[in-house]
Image: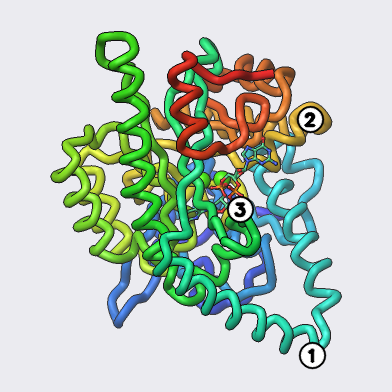
Amino acid sequence: MYRKSIAPGIAVFGEGAPADCAYIIERGSVEIAIEREGRLVVLAALGPGEIFGEAALLDDHPRPATATARTELDVLVVPRDAVDESLRGAHPDAYLLVRSLLTRLQAVHERRASPPPAGAMRDEVVRTLTIEGELRSGLDNDEFEPFFQPIVDLDTGEIAGFEALARWRKPDRGLIPPIEFIGVAEQTGLIREIDAMVLTSAWKGLAAAQEAVATKHGRAAKPLFLSINIAAENFVDMQLVTRVRELLGTTGFDPALLKLEITESGLINSPEIAYRVLTELRAMGVSIALDDFGTGYSSLSYLHRFPIDSLKIDRTFVHALASSERSRAIVRTIAGLGQSMSLKVIAEGIEEESTADMLREMGLRYGQGYHYSMPVGRASMAAMLLAGGVVSS
Ligand code: C2E
Ligand code: CA
Ligand code: CA
């Protein structure tokens, strides 16, 4: 770890440069930009206390963007293999984020160290082609449906909304979880149709359940938000904007109750179009959550550039809360980040009451996980609402 001063206009690193350091800004500012179709697109302008180049810590890939000093810049350079205790004293928040990234880097390296043999790769291609064919016919036969997992207000225990999660009801195999088909659906573009189906069907399912609750009580049901996962390929496509606009127009549903969960990959691959799509969605009143927060490449830069209003803390950090001081510190850091940037923070993967207690103490307001409820089908979701909430253990 060492300090470096860089004059304005000079590149700290360029696109394609080897990725081996993270930089923490001590003074001045830096601009992170990417070249697309011959034009420079600025991803973020960062200032003191902020980290950039985190991608470097994740793997051996060359850097996807160029970082240029905007003003006289003083940075603390943290090489991949030199994160030491002195960083903890100088920059405690940065230390924690860097450490968490390094832990995952280790996992990537371990996976690379034992690549699959050639026969296994051929099997993988055959498997992908088979699933693709089955996915197509499954879509034609309406075999996909949304499940619903409640997102709970941690203070009151009341349901604040639901996340819709795709399930494939395959006649010969029963209910299939996304892990078995989302990957292939993304590779083949079929994810567009799946996401569109989930969006419409979950919306309708929740509206019908809310209507039943209203009928039972003789007054309007408490408004609940609906979170929908949107694959990176989809939200860099203006069609998503059209589809959401149509849906809101035909159903009269309140856009403020629709939350789209996105991950970082689409933001980094096509930042310009992602920016346009997200800005138009926000203008319609729809909110945007950054999913799996804390596991991506350079999450912090995106918060400056894109109109994001919620963060979902990845469940790996939540699971480790009780056992790891580091995870507690990471969650606390993200909670603080949310507070200072006025972002809603939602914790995923709460499996125990003790975890919910800790999260509450850290100031978190929303959570979801098996402790409250597994994702359930439409009928159970409606029954849950009619019964007045989650039937938590
Ligand atoms: P995700 O968006 O991070 O969704 C949360 C996942 O965590 C869900 O897995 C959920 O069942 C699981 N989960 C919830 N609470 C707990 C808990 O307490 N402990 C543990 N261990 N897990 C919990 P699921 O339904 O299998 O979905 C997996 C992933 O597939 C999702 O991760 C999301 O990335 C993707 N996915 C699911 N549905 C859709 C969809 O309609 N469209 C797109 N594009 N992706 C989807
Ligand atoms: Ca999600
Ligand atoms: Ca997630």
Mark before the other along the chain sequence, 3 or 2: 3
Name the side, left or right, on which 280 lies relative to 118: left
Confirm or reject: label 3 Cβ below 8 Å from ligand 1: no
Type of the residue with mark 3: Leu
Please, which residue is most extreme toward the left here? Answer: 249
Instruction: Name the residue: 36% across, 63% down.
Output: 234
Q: Which residue is labeled 1 in the image? A: 118
Q: Decide: few, some or many residues near mark 3? Use Cα within 10 Å; few <14, some 14-19, many ≥20.
A: some
Query: x, y (%) of residue 294?
Result: 60, 46
Type of the residue with mark 1: Ala
> Viewer-nearest of labels 3 and 1?
3
Instruction: Name the residue: 41% across, 54% down.
Output: 230
Mark before the other along the chain sequence, 3 or 1: 1
For the residue pair 171 and 341, the one nearer the viewer reads as 171
Secondary-structure class at tag 3: strand
Type of the residue with mark 2: Glu
* 280, above or below 13, in the image: above
Q: Quadrant of residue 347?
A: top right
Disc 3 from disc 2: Cα separation: 37 Å
> Viewer-nearest of labels 3 and 2?
3
Instruction: Name the residue: 78% across, 56% down.
Output: 82
Q: Which residue is labeled 3 in the image? A: 175
Q: Which residue is labeled 2 in the image? A: 325
Asked whether the beta carbons under mark 3 and mark 2 sit within 8 Å of each other, the answer is no
* 96, above or below 232, in the image: above
Name the side, left or right, on which 158 lies relative to 392: left
Secondary-structure class at tag 2: helix
Query: x, y (%) of residue 274?
Result: 32, 60
Q: Is residue 69 visible?
A: no
